[in-house]
Amino acid sequence: MKVKYATMIVKDMDESIKFYTEVMGFEIDSQYDLGPAGAITLLKGEGDAMIEIIKNPTDEPGLFSIGMDVEDISTKVEELKSKGVKITMEPTTITVGTLAFLEDPNGVRIALIQHH
């Protein structure tokens, strides 16, 4: 597995984009308008991992999850379950592939993503 995203919920998308691009030196990779559900912006810096910032009406600002790329999400989820890992969302189809969530021992959300 490799880290793909650090996902944060933000209060103000424009202010956050300005901070990460003008202050931190990231570039906008892609943006998604989710209508009333909010918006997502992916920001790319050096290396492969990106920052994903999300503005939505339901989640509190702050770190939401760490996203990790996997080749075979079903196999990885079963492997993690066999090791006693708490899976908080079973593999679910999303726009870019398949997504599942688990928690580390501290309650930190980890997203597993198998891209198309």
Image: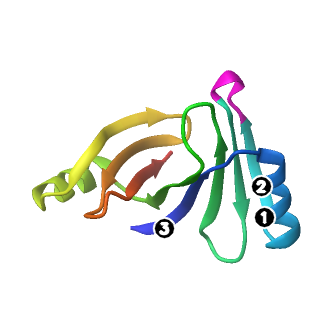
- Looking at the picture, tell me which residue is in the foreground, 75 or 104: 104
Give the amino acid at mark 1: Tyr
Mark 2 and mark 1 residues within 8 Å of each other at the beta carbon? yes
Give residue 16's mark: 2
In the rendered view, would you say 79 is above or below 25? Answer: above
Q: Nearer the viewer, residue 94 or 54?
A: 54
Secondary structure beneath label 2: helix
Is 67 above or below relative to 98? below
Label pair 1/3, CB-CB below 8 angstroms: no
| Secondary structure beneath label 3 | strand
Color scheme of the displayed model = rainbow
Q: Nearer the viewer, mark 1 or mark 3?
A: 1
Residue lying farthest to the bottom in this orientation = 46
How many residues crowd mark 2 within 10 Å: few (<14), some (14–19), many (20+)? some
| Camera-side mark, 2 or 3 | 2
Rendered image: mark on residue 3: 3
Q: Secondary structure at mark 1?
A: helix
* Residue located at (63% from left, 63% from top): 50
Number of marks in the rendered image = 3
In which quadrant of the rendered image does the N terminus lie? Answer: bottom left
Where does the magenta region start and end? 33-37
Q: Residue, x 55% and y 60% (percent of image)?
A: 5
Residue at which label 1 appears: 20
Classify 10 Å Cα crowding around label 1: few (below 14), some (14-19), many (20 and above). Answer: some
Pick the residue in front: 35 or 99.
35
Q: Is residue 88 left or right of residue 45?
A: left
Residue 104 location (% of width, % of height): 29, 62
CA gap, disc 2 and disc 3: 21 Å
Q: Disc 3 marks which amino acid? A: Val
